[in-house]
Amino acid sequence: MSKYKNSIYALTSGVLLSLAWTQWMNGLILMLAYVPLLFVEDNLYRQRHINKSVVAFYYSFISFIIWNLATTWWLAEISKPGMLVIVILNSICMASVFWAFHFSKRLLGIKTGYFLFVFFWIAFEYLHLNWELSWSWLNLGNGLGKNIEIIQWYKFTGTLGGSLWILTANIIILFGLIKIIKFKTFRAGIYNFIVVFLLILIPISISFFIFYSDEDKGNPCNIVIIQPNIDPFTEKFDGLNEQEQINLLINLAKQKADISTDYFIAPETALFKSIWEDKLNINQGVRQIIAFLQNYPDAKFIIGAVTKKKYQIAENRSPVARKLEGANIYYDEYNSALQITAGGKIEIYHKSNLVIGVEKMPFPKTLGFLEKLTIDLGGTNASLDTDDEPVVFSDKAGNCNIATLICYESVFGEYLNKSVRKGANAVAIITNDGWWGETPGYIQHLRYSQIRAIETGRGIARSANTGISCFINQKGELLQASKFGNEDVIKGTISPNSKFTFYTTNGDYIGRIASFLAVLGILFTIVGALKKQN
């Protein structure tokens, strides 16, 4: 194929990959989205005597820059330079993985090469879930998030199982087309399409059976979810003061509160002025919530807050600790969730998976001097600290023990598994999706919450400052979803479930296996390169 055709094919893959993240295209489009790009790679492989391997990087970068830009352009609502950095770096990472596959295929042969393509890609996605530069928004399995009826088997595999499914289907379709178009072996090509048809049909059939036969388990927990709809740019930090915002939250809660309410849930950073953790009980907002709960003594109130904790100078402190001006005291600041009871008991959870460039500077021991370059989203422009382990908010009745995920944390399936294994039988997600405006970003974010419900079999209560607040049942179905830009309060139930799914118990085992095999593949490739050189 000519350079022009190669470019058109690469562009086509970028468009097809992007379509899966839209609201009007079924995610199954991913089953053939890689095929045009793989055609380009196959052409480069067959003409490897005149093409350098790095050309595969160039064409794949075309696909991936289109995919990244078309699906995550809404990050520009926060920072245009930040969006460009994320889009370009992630596209480079993806293109590097594709180039590594092409290079290995040249040295180790066609069959081994395609096996390594699957292992390399899933290992990359697994790495993207677990390192300092984590940006797993576009992991392939996430692209099926709006099609919950066909991914109920994620409770066995997690999203990486979806990625494995998608990559395998693309390769089999590619083989079928090559047999028909290039080698004119129609019967063999049709055989490939029958195989891929069964590969797609069987998991979908299993999923439909699970979806329509399973029911939520556990005694219902009564929850009131509050969506105050406070604009983060004009009202949250510069317009309404904290007192006015707390009054709004409590007045909304009163609309649906009754003596049967077990939980009230308010969004991320609803208490946005930094509170010293040793003085939480004297904070005006916290005291108002405690006073409100006197009418509902058995209820708990989960709310997002910005908190900070002091260290004495001799203590071990985190790499991101800051010095208190005018004193020999260091402190850390956190994006936190509080659980408050009528008796004044307060439990604290600190967000552990932070947003790069907004809440943290990666590799703080090395790049800590750059922390002031983080984007100011409400009172801080330096890296936050985190908890090492998740915290499960307790219920004295033992019925509803809630794991709380703060915003971006809802992207991480294996992290939620830790909370489930620590006793969480239900989930709260608190977020502020208003930063992205009425763009696809807040809808994509919601879809990942639905995936977490499927993976863990846990019901979810989701409170967004604005965006979509809702209940999500154990099958990932949306219940009582609010609308973007509306002030709202909804009342419903989630059913606590203490049973573990296979994925909850075993986590991202597919990622670990793929990473091991990818390392072996890299070693074999290096050996092959050395032999060729000699």
Image (cartoon, rainbow, N blue to C red):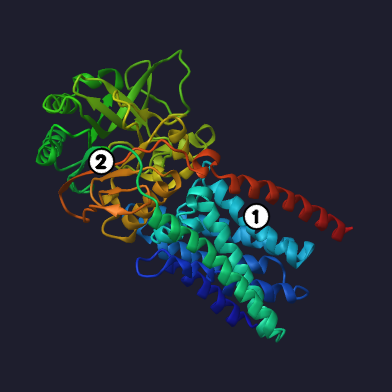
Counting other residues with Cα less than 10 Å from the Cα at mark 1, is it few (<14), some (14-19), or many (20 or more)? many
- Disc 2 from disc 1: Cα separation: 38 Å
Asked if residue 148 is positioned above or below residue 471 in the image, the reply reads below
Q: Where's the N terminus, which quadrant?
A: bottom right
Counting other residues with Cα less than 10 Å from the Cα at mark 2, is it few (<14), some (14-19), or many (20 or more)? many
Q: Which numbered disc covers residue 119?
A: 1
Q: Residue at x 66, y 74 (%)?
A: 175
Label 2: state its secondary structure: loop
Contact between marks 2 and 1 (CB within 8 A): the answer is no
- Amino acid under disc 2: Pro
Q: Say left or right for 255 vs 414.
A: left
Residue 347 versus residue 153: which sits nearer the camera?
153
Number of dots carrying numbers: 2
- Amino acid under disc 1: Phe
Q: Residue at x 65, y 55 (%)?
A: 119
Q: Say left or right for 443 vs 168.
A: left
Q: Where's the C terminus, which quadrant?
A: bottom right
Residue 430, image quadrant? top left
Q: Which numbered disc covers residue 33?
A: none
Q: Position of residue 425 (x, y in %)?
A: 38, 35
Q: Position of residue 213 (x, y in %)?
A: 40, 54
Residue 212 versus residue 299: which sits nearer the camera?
212
Q: Which numbered disc covers residue 267?
A: 2
